Image (spheres, rainbow, N blue to C red):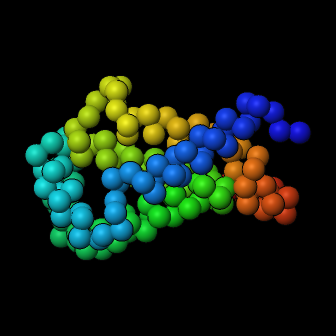
């Protein structure tokens, strides 16, 4: 029997998945990373700017494609409840990067900060095993952590 509290985890999971589809995290355009790098060079943390300039910028086409694929994966996986914990880890990685690029305070208000909280809640809950494909897979693979 699924409790009302457990349905809140499912709601958080689906909401975060849908937000990855409809937000401005990426619009399925790998060349969008060029604008992101310029923005981060002006606004991001200094240590983050250095990392972007030395490691990401020389390989921007590859990283742009990886970001788009990761965002699509997170959106689909969270909405249907497939590899939910892995998807929340990928979402955390992306969201922390977006926050660092903006130079935002981790404890300040913002959409990235609130989405990070949701991703952590999803990671440590059974949001995929309550209602989703993970529930079916968990019956056969109960110890697989990514479900």
- Between residue 27 and residue 135, name the one nearer to us: 27
Q: Position of residue 28 (x, y in %)?
A: 36, 68
Q: Residue at x 39, y 46 (%)?
A: 95
The answer to whether 141 is drawn above or below residue 15 in the figure is: below
Q: Residue at x 17, y 59 (%)?
A: 35
Q: How many marks?
A: 0
Q: Which residue is at the far left?
A: 42
Can residue 146 be seen here? Answer: no
User: Which image quarter is the C terminus in?
Assistant: bottom right
- Between residue 26 and residue 97, name the one nearer to us: 26
Residue 21 falls in which quadrant of the image? bottom left
Can residue 9 be seen here? Answer: yes
Q: Which residue is at the far front?
A: 22
The answer to whether residue 19 is left or right of residue 3 is: left
Residue 63 falls in which quadrant of the image? bottom left
The answer to whether 100 is drawn above or below residue 59 in the figure is: above
Q: Residue at x 69, y 51 (%)?
A: 128
Q: Position of residue 44 (x, y in %)?
A: 19, 43
């Amino acid at each position: 029997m699924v409790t009302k509290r457990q349905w809140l985890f499912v709601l958080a999971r689906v909401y975060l998945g849908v937000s990855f589809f409809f937000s401005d995290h990426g619009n399925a355009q790998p060349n969008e990373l060029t604008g992101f790098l310029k923005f981060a060079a002006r606004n991001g943390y200094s240590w983050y700017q250095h990392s972007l300039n030395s490691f990401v910028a020389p390989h921007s086409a590859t990283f742009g494609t990886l970001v788009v694929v990761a965002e699509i994966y997170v959106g689909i996986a969270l909405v249907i409840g497939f590899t939910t914990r892995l998807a929340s880890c990928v979402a955390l990685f992306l969201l922390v990067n977006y926050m660092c690029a903006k130079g935002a305070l981790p404890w300040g208000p913002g959409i990235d900060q609130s989405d990070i909280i949701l991703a952590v809640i999803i990671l440590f809950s059974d949001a995929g095993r309550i209602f989703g494909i993970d529930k079916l897979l968990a019956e056969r693979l109960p110890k697989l952590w990514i479900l």
